[in-house]
Amino acid sequence: MIGLKHGDARLIFDPSVGNIPLWEVTGRQPLHNAPWRDEPEVQAAPDIPLVNKRLAGDFFCMPFGADDLGGDPIHGYPANSVWEVLEAGVSHAHFRLQAPVRGAVVEKELRLTGPVLYQTHRIVGGEGQVTLAHHPMSRMAAGGRLSFSRKRAVLTDPAPQYEGHNLWALNQIQPDLHLPCEDGTEWDLRVYPAGHAVEDFVSLVEARDARLAWTVLIREAEDDMLVVLKDPRVLPITMLWISNGGRDFPPWNGRHTGVIGIEDGIAAGGAGLKAALTENRFTAMGVPTALTLGPTHLIRHAMVSLPRPPGWGEVVEITETHGVLTLIEARGERISVPFDENFLPS
């Protein structure tokens, strides 16, 4: 394990599988670990992918989801194999994935600065096309609310995550955050379905002119906020994975509850790599669903952990100006934190 510290923030990175089992800021732990992560019987099971055996925190997927063309493990080698430590300082670290992906070399940089966790993945060389995404997960003891940067479409997958356990109707494209459900009712996507035993997935497409894209999760019982930031020109969709007791088979066994994955990437939603490399519902809107390997690509992703200011229920805008990130609540209240102005290109 590799540990990083900065001020009252600390992080642990597991180079054996490429995930972050701990990120703590002033006692807050915004990321989620699966309850079976250290259970011997799960760790010994030969039919469970390593990414699921050690499911924790955030990890980089390449390809994202199922590789139904090349046969890589689910979410790819970055989430299932060893990362070599190139440099490990007090508050930053640099790693290289030992297994190439389609011939590409993948490197990871982690940096802590106060409540902000910066991640950069450098992808050099390789051939063909591939999907990718970050996979941060958070858990809520009593539900929460979501806020988003402007979106132009919301899509549910053609097939369910787990048959019979989805909340939202399949294969729909909506212009806003209100989704028809399987039972004919309508769901506001800004509300986590805490009272429903579901396993579901939805993809949100960024606005055409977006330069800074974000998701904010306000956790009710934890009384905090997780801010997830990206460059939408590189990662054009945000995929939400809702895992709230819907999987009743091992190792999940109905105990994976209150979990949301906020998965920023370039992919065809929850469909596999084959679907992403052909014409699909996203490409029909001019949204790319795969990255072309060969040149060097930089994938930048940042998360911020903050206490929830009293009364805050929805963030309506986030700006980054001159090294300051400012969140604006629906009533006009603001909070600001320092943010590296050179990290996300304007």
Image (cartoon, grey):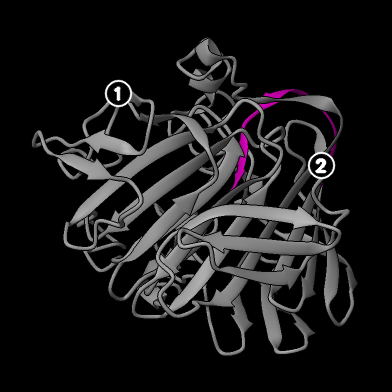
Q: Which mark is residue 45?
A: none
Q: Position of residue 254 (x, y in %)?
A: 21, 63
Q: Residues within 10 Å of mark 1 (few under 14, many from 20)?
A: few
Identify the element where label 2 is drawn. Answer: loop
Q: Position of residue 281 (x, y in %)?
A: 45, 16
- Residue 17 in sight: no
Which amino acid type is marked by label 1? Answer: Asn
Q: Position of residue 47 (x, y in %)?
A: 39, 52
Q: Is residue 308 left or right of residue 299?
A: left
Identify the element where label 1 is drawn. Answer: loop
User: Residue tagged by mark 2?
Assistant: 346
Q: Nearer the viewer, residue 282 or 325?
A: 325
Vertical order, 83 against 263 (above or below) = below
Q: Nearer the viewer, residue 196 or 295?
A: 196
User: Residue tagged by mark 1?
Assistant: 171
> On the image, which quarter does residue 290 sit in?
top right
Which amino acid type is marked by label 2? Answer: Ser
Magenta region = 122-134
Vertical order, 330 against 123 (above or below) = below
